[in-house]
């Protein structure tokens, strides 16, 4: 790769788009790839994954990578996700002060607590979004990933004579944007329903994040 600096983060983003690849770690020394570690599902032959990696590196970055530098670990990802303990809502805090509101959300997983707090303008439409985005920030700590997502809208709708919270979350993964929807029936605490709907929106994506 002549006169071009190799950026591991860019390579990792592109390679995770390859079918079957869950995560990638690129090790660079003196502007040359010396190790490329891949975590993949068991659905595809590792030799095919390796060939795909080589093809993408050459066509996208003009990098001729020796297959001996590529290390592939395959896992049964669906089994791992089924064994994971579910994320639970531990506490929701909500205070107002003049024109501002402050929301705090604490989530737990496997006995570990993850807390986030956000502040914003105290308007009826903004209050719900703040709670949803506070939930997403706490969730980001659990996922441990640099994904980008934001709660775009929160609505209360009526379906079958039941009040339901609907949350729309925009997610950017590997430069691709998706809109995810989550719902939760309102029982007694609308704020808890917002948190539940937010978690529901991204629940199916956690496997890929």
Image (cartoon, rainbow, N blue to C red):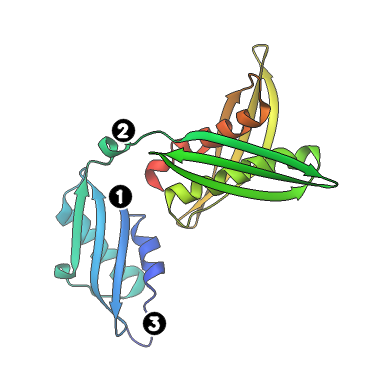
| Nearest the eye: 178 or 92 | 92
Indicate whether 114 appears above or below 199.
below
Mark 3 Cα within 10 Å, few/some/many (few <14, many 20+)?
few
3D distance between C-alphas at marks 2 and 3: 41 Å
The residue wearing badge 1 is 19
How many numbered marks does the figure carry? 3
The disc, 1 or 2, on the residue closer to the chain's N-terminal end is 1
Q: Quadrant of residue 168?
A: top right
Residue situated furthest top in the rendering: 161
Residue at x 44% of width, y 47% of height: 142
3D distance between C-alphas at marks 1 and 2: 21 Å
Mark 1 Cα within 10 Å, few/some/many (few <14, many 20+)?
few
Residue at x 70% of width, y 27% of height: 156
Residue at x 36% of width, y 69% of height: 60
Q: Nearer the viewer, mark 1 or mark 3?
A: 3
The residue wearing badge 3 is 5
Mark 2 Cα within 10 Å, few/some/many (few <14, many 20+)?
few
Q: Is residue 46 left or right of residue 59?
A: left
3D distance between C-alphas at marks 1 and 3: 26 Å
Image mark for residue 82: 2
Give the SS element for disc 2: helix
The disc, 2 or 3, on the residue closer to the chain's N-terminal end is 3
């Amino acid at each position: 790769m002549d006169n071009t600096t190799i950026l591991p983060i860019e390579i990792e983003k592109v390679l995770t788009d390859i079918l079957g690849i869950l995560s990638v770690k690129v090790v660079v020394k003196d502007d040359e790839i010396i190790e490329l570690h891949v975590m993949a599902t068991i659905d595809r032959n590792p030799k095919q994954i390796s060939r795909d990696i080589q093809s993408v590196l050459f066509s996208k970055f003009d990098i001729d990578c020796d297959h001996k530098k590529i290390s592939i670990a395959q896992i049964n990802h669906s089994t791992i996700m089924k064994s994971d303990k579910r994320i639970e809502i531990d506490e929701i805090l909500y205070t107002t002060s003049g024109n501002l509101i402050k929301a705090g959300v604490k989530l737990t997983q496997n006995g570990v607590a993850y807390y986030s707090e956000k502040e914003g303008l105290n308007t009826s439409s903004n209050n719900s979004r703040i709670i949803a985005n506070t939930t997403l920030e706490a969730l980001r700590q659990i996922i441990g990933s640099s994904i980008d997502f934001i709660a775009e809208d929160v609505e209360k709708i009526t379906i079958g004579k039941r009040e339901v919270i609907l949350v729309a979350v925009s997610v950017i993964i590997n430069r691709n944007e998706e809109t995810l929807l989550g719902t939760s029936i309102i029982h007694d605490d609308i704020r808890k329903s917002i948190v539940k709907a937010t978690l529901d929106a991204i629940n199916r994506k956690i496997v890929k994040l």
